[in-house]
Amino acid sequence: MTRLLLLPVAAAALALGASPALADDGPRLVRAPKVDVRTVTAGGDSFVSIGASFRLDREFSSDAERFQYAIVVAPHLRAGQKLPDELFGGTTFGRIGARGGHCFRAEAVQLRKRAKVRRGARWQAALVHRSTVVGPVRTVTLRRVADDPARDARALGC
């Protein structure tokens, strides 16, 4: 009986244009992340590595949940966007600042490998859950500065 009641509700939600990405009750970015860009050379190949420090609205319920998320930085993103199977970069979230601040640092996932980016460029950042952009998409400015998680934690209010 419960299943019969849920089918019309799900159909109505789809008809109204409800996005599955917005239905996810996971953590959300509180404000625009602090993004650092650096060029890395390895084995004669140069590529851009993007580090992101960010604050979430809540704590992850478990480490298993934390490992399901990534942060992505790209020139253009939109909520609900499905990402391709092959991405470049990305690491798991490491905590910065006080535990109650819900602040993290990670290498951001990129949609493709890049040899260079323009300093001061305005890109977008968002959380990704299971290959789908979830929550708000924030605009960030790419900066080439020394990696300083303590400075980023203070700027994010952690």
Image (cartoon, rainbow, N blue to C red):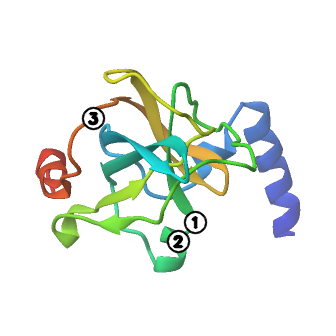
Gap between marks 2 and 1 measured at Cα: 5 Å
Left or right of residue 58, residue 73 in this image = right
- Say which of marks 2 and 3 sits in front: 3
Q: Which residue lies under the disc numbered 2?
A: 65
- The first of marks 2 and 3 along the sequence is 2
Category of crowding for the residue at label 1, using alpha-carbon neighbours closer than 10 angstroms: few (below 14), some (14–19), many (at least 20): few
Q: In this picture, is 135 found above or below 122? A: below
State the SS at label 1: loop
Gap between marks 1 and 3 measured at Cα: 28 Å
Left or right of residue 70, residue 7 in this image = right
* Point 73% across, 40% down: residue: 13
Mark 2–mark 1 contact, CB under 8 Å?
yes
Q: Residue 125: x and y, percent?
A: 45, 37
- Amino acid under disc 3: Arg
Q: Please give the count of numbered marks on the rendered protein.
A: 3
Gap between marks 2 and 3 measured at Cα: 31 Å
Q: Which residue lies under the disc numbered 3?
A: 144
* Point 52% across, 25% down: residue: 75
Left or right of residue 16, residue 154 in this image = left
Q: Residue 22: x and y, percent?
A: 58, 44
Mark 2–mark 3 contact, CB under 8 Å?
no
State the SS at label 2: helix
Mark 1–mark 3 contact, CB under 8 Å?
no
Q: Residue 105: x and y, percent?
A: 33, 58
Q: Nearer the viewer, residue 65 or 35?
A: 35
- Amino acid under disc 1: Gln
Q: Which residue lies under the disc numbered 1?
A: 68
Q: Residue 46: x and y, percent?
A: 51, 41
State the SS at label 3: loop
